[in-house]
Amino acid sequence: MPRIFPEIPETAGGHRGQPKDVNLIRNAIDAMSELPACKRILSLAAECTKDETIEIAVADTGKGLSPDIADRVFEAFFTTKEEGLGIGLAISRTIVEAHGGRLWTVPNRPQGAVFCFALPLLNGEAEDELAAYRVSRG
Ligand SMILES: Nc1ncnc2c1ncn2[C@@H]1O[C@H](COP(=O)(O)OP(=O)(O)OP(=O)(O)O)[C@@H](O)[C@H]1O
Ligand SMILES: [Mg+2]
């Protein structure tokens, strides 16, 4: 899968980023599945902040998160889907935090949810590690 924003500098964890990105988008699509097509809006935004962090936001206009659910969505095996495993967000948060980042959610206005994650941009040491990782994978 191509990178969504190819012009953005690589971040820590970039080499393992795709499953997390896909889960956030899959979740957003699922949350809007009961809406008529014209009301389903998926928005992606990316910003590099001054403290050398990149923030990505995935916003939808779906059913959103009630306060009791918002506290639980990052728990492993929490799901409201008949065929969900409930591990997508737990894994995403573990991966992001392992790379010094954060993953969180806020409500979208007037309707829906926004999932955001922030990752530190690569410093020299991390770039060396990534290069070694790529060499080891051939
Ligand atoms: N964008 C969203 N809007 C509304 N609810 C959401 C959204 N994203 C996640 N959720 C809620 O959080 C729960 C947990 O999401 P998570 O991705 O961890 O698991 P899942 O999608 O249910 O299953 P899977 O393990 O296959 O990803 C979902 O079941 C859903 O209730
Ligand atoms: Mg999921």
Image (cartoon, rainbow, N blue to C red):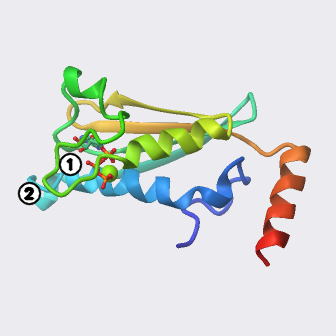
Q: Nearer the viewer, mark 2 or mark 1?
A: 1
Does residue 68 appear to the left or right of 5 in the view shown? left
SS at badge 2: loop
In the current view of this chain or complex, which residue is farthest to the front? 77
Disc 1 secondary structure class: helix
Label 1 near ligand 1 (CB < 8 Å):
yes
Q: Which residue is mark 1?
A: 31
The residue under the point 24% across, 37% down is: 112
Left or right, 15 with reference to 34: right
Residue 31 point in image, percent of width and height: 20, 48
Residue 84 x, y percent position in the rendering: 23, 53
Judging depth in this view, the residue of 112 and 79 nearest the camera is 79
Earlier sequence position, callout 2 versus callout 1:
1
Q: Nearer the viewer, residue 134 or 11?
A: 134
Residue 46 image-quadrant placement? top right
Q: Vertical placement of 114 versus 15: above or below?
A: above
Type of amino acid under label 2: Pro
Identify the residue at image location x=91%, y=46%.
Answer: 124
The tally of labels here is 2
Q: Which residue matches tag 2?
A: 36
Mark 2 closeness class: few <14, some 14–19, many ≥20 residues within 10 Å: few
Above or below, comparing residue 128 to residue 96 in the picture: below
Q: Give the alpha-carbon distance from disc 2 to disc 1, as whole Å.
A: 12 Å
Question: Is any part of residue 24 visible from this angle?
Answer: yes
Q: What residue sits 85% from the left and 43% below the top?
A: 123
Would residue 81 appear left or right of 2 to someone viewing this image? left
Residue type (three-letter) at the residue carrying disc 1 = Ala
Residue at 30% across, 28% down: 72
Q: Which mark is residue 125?
A: none
Residue 28 is left or right of residue 96, and the answer is left
**In the rendered image, the vertical position of residue 132 relative to residue 46, given as above or below:** below
